[in-house]
Image: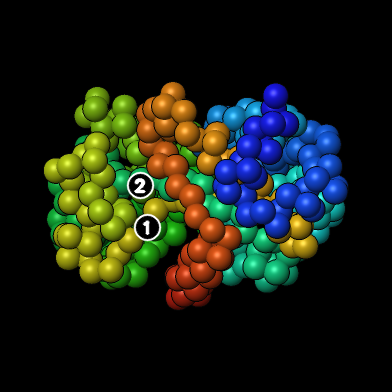
Amino acid sequence: MQRRSLLSLLATGSLVPAAFPVLAQAAWPSQPIRLIVPYPAGGGTDYFARLVAPGMGEALGQPVIVENRPGASGIIGATAVARHLPADGYTFLLGDMTTYAVNPSMFEKLAYDPLKDLAPVTMTAKFDFLLVVNPTVLPVRNVPELVALAARMPQGLNYASPSVGTTHHLATELLARETGMKVVAITYKGGGPAVQDLLGGQVGMMFLDRASARSHIESGRLRAIAAAGAHRIPAYPDLPTVAEQGIKGFEVEGWQGFTVRAGTPAPVVRALSAAYLKAIAPAEVKQKLNENGIDPVSGTPEQFTRYIEAETEKWRRVVRERNIKAE
């Protein structure tokens, strides 16, 4: 039955007809498929992978098994897929902005080239980010007030970052570049400790994903002063974006997507993409994603490639101009 799910996709045109002979000839997939997550279990990327893996496995007719290979800003897991595991369609990667667009600028001798050693399958999700403050530390209600307060603090504003090169980190450095604020990064080993110190008042502000910020905003312990993306967040319709508050062109969002090792057969890439679309189709899956601040998206490999290229150039400038170094 599961095998027929893939064949039905081919028959209805979800996969191009040319894919069928190759897949049939190779009998792909004839064994379980590994989805490499280059971060620890329990995080947002891991949550997404484990939510969609069962549906993808059902569509493909073989289990999709999530395997965490964390470490070194996602480099360990990404390198495994890009350089060490075969391009046979039995391993694919769920990476993010850091994996694909930031690491090339952060590390002088990166073990993999995201645009040469990996082949995009599809973007899978975007994440809303909010600029939040601890109101007892920074009693501001918008970005102009934050900038004005920073101007009176020559030592700079401390902000929390889960790690170097994350969306949380680079969004703050981009804001500092665009406003002239002096900021000081306080770097932690993960999002949990960073948020705890923000709540405790050891640091005053942070760009934080919507799912992590929600309960603390509702309790009043944190105050959201801006949405980081190009548009307002439906859950916070009265919260203006950073750009709306005078920082023209400011746009930051978290994102992630699937890639395979370069050289993986194109029909396999299309089959993985089609399986992903089936996995996110059920209403209960969409509800769980929405509850966690995840916006499922999709697209062609070419679209994902162009997006990675644009993000790589954007963050290369920020890393260079802000003199950001890997720890």
Dot 2, crowdedness within 10 Å: few (<14), some or many (≥20)? many
Of helix, strand and loop, which one carries label 1?
A: loop
Q: Amino acid at mark 2?
A: Phe
Dot 1, crowdedness within 10 Å: few (<14), some or many (≥20)? many
Question: In 3D space, how far apart are the residues under numbered discs 1 and 2 (Cα atoms)?
Answer: 7 Å
Reading the image, the residue beneath label 2 is 129
Q: Position of residue 13 (x, y in %)?
A: 58, 48
Of helix, strand and loop, which one carries label 2?
A: strand
Quadrant where the C terminus is found in the figure = bottom right
**Residue shown at 70%/57% (left/top)?**
18
Reading the image, the residue beneath label 1 is 252
Say which mark, if any, is on residue 73.
none
Q: Amino acid at mark 1?
A: Val
Q: Is residue 201 shown to the viewer in this render?
A: yes
**Residue shown at 54%/36% (left/top)?**
278
Q: Position of residue 42 (x, y in %)?
A: 57, 30
Q: Which one is earlier in the sequence, the residue at label 1 or at label 2?
A: 2
Is 246 displayed left or right of 6 in the figure?
Answer: left
Q: Position of residue 317 (x, y in %)?
A: 47, 75
- Among the 4 quarters of the image, the one containing residue 184: bottom left
- Among the 4 quarters of the image, the one containing residue 1: top right
**Contact check, label 1 and label 2, Cβ < 8 Å:** yes
Asked which colour scheme the image uses, the reply is: rainbow
Q: Nearer the viewer, residue 265 or 218?
A: 265
- Among the 4 quarters of the image, the one containing residue 295: top left
